[in-house]
Image (spheres, helix red, strand yellow):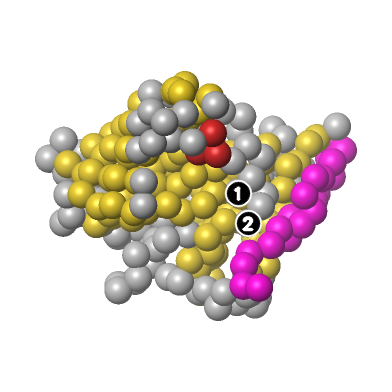
Amino acid sequence: SQQGEEDPQALSIQEGENATMNCSYKTSINNLQWYRQNSGRGLVHLILIRSNEREKHSGRLRVTLDTSKKSSSLLITASRAADTASYFCATDAGNQGGKLIFGQGTELSVKP
Amino acid sequence: DGGITQSPKYLFRKEGQNVTLSCEQNLNHDAMYWYRQDPGQGLRLIYYSQIVNDFQKGDIAEGYSVSREKKESFPLTVTSAQKNPTAFYLCASSTGPFPPFHNEQFFGPGTRLTVL
C-alpha cells in the first residue's frame, strides 16, 4: 500500500530557482524522510523530520511537517542542474517493524 | 569502504526460471529490506528482516522468497510463480527499527531484472 502521495509528479525549473515538492500521507507517523534517486540508481537519504518537529534544514534543503494536515514539503533553494533527480517521501509509522512507506515521487528537472 | 552492494547489476531470466539477487552490507546493520520499483513508480516492499534468521512479508511478497542466515546478507529469489518480475530491485539496510534509532535506510545500487 502506498501511503504517501507526492505533488507535483514532475517539475521543471531553471537553475537558480527554488523547487518545492509536497507529500501527503494518511496515518499517524513517527517520522517522515525524504530520499533522492538519480536515474537508474539507488536512493540516497536526504533528511529526516520527527513527528514533533515542524521544520528542519540541511544545507539548501528545508523540510516542513504539518501533522494536523498530514503533509510535508521539501524545498530546494538555488537549484542546480545536479539536483535533477526523483525525490521521494517515506513515512515511518513507528509500529510496523521499521517499515517505510514510500510515495510515488516527484521527478525534478533543473535546466542550466 | 562501508556500504551495501547488490549483484548483478543486470539480470536476464527466461520464463519459468528462478533467479537469486544478491545483497550484502558491511554496515553492521540489523535490518535489511527488499523493494521493487516499476517505471515511474515509487518503491514497494517485498520482504524485510529485522534480525538474523527472521524475516517478514511486505506488501508484495507473492512469488518471492528470502533468507537471512547471516547479518551481512539478505538474498532475494524471484521464483517462477512471480507473474511479472521485470522491474528494478533495490535492497536497503538500517540500524534497526527500535528507539532511539530512526530507521534511516541505506540503499544499494539496484539490480535490473528482465524476463525474456
Horizontal arrangement in the rendering, residue A109 relative to residue A103 (left or right):
right
Q: Residue at x 45, y 47 (%)?
A: A35
The numbered disc on residue B108 is 2
Q: Amino acid at mark 1?
A: Gly
SS category of the residue bearing label 2: loop
Q: Which residues are magenta?
A: B1-22
Judging from the image, mark 1 belongs to the subunit labelled A
- Residue at the spot of label 1: A42
Horizontal arrangement in the rendering, residue B18 relative to residue A10 (left or right):
right
- Please check the rendered image and state whether residue A94 is part of the magenta-colored stretch, yes or no: no
Q: Residue at x 53, y 64 (%)?
A: B93
x, y (%) of residue A22?
31, 32
Vertical order, A60 against B104 (above or below) = above
| Label 2, residues with CA under 10 Å away: few <14, some 14-19, many ≥20 | many
Tell me, yes or no, whether the two marked residues, 2 and 1, touch with CB atoms within 8 Å: yes
x, y (%) of residue A94?
29, 59
Horizontal arrangement in the rendering, residue A26 relative to residue A100 (left or right):
left
Q: Residue at x 24, y 57 (%)?
A: A50
x, y (%) of residue A98?
39, 61
- Where, by quadrant of the figure, is residue B62 drawn? top right
Vertical order, B65 against A80 (above or below) = below
Q: Amino acid at mark 2?
A: Gly
Residue that lies at the very extreme toward the left in this rendered image: A68
x, y (%) of residue B64?
65, 50
Vertical order, B31 against B18 (above or below) = below
| Label 1, residues with CA under 10 Å away: few <14, some 14-19, many ≥20 | many
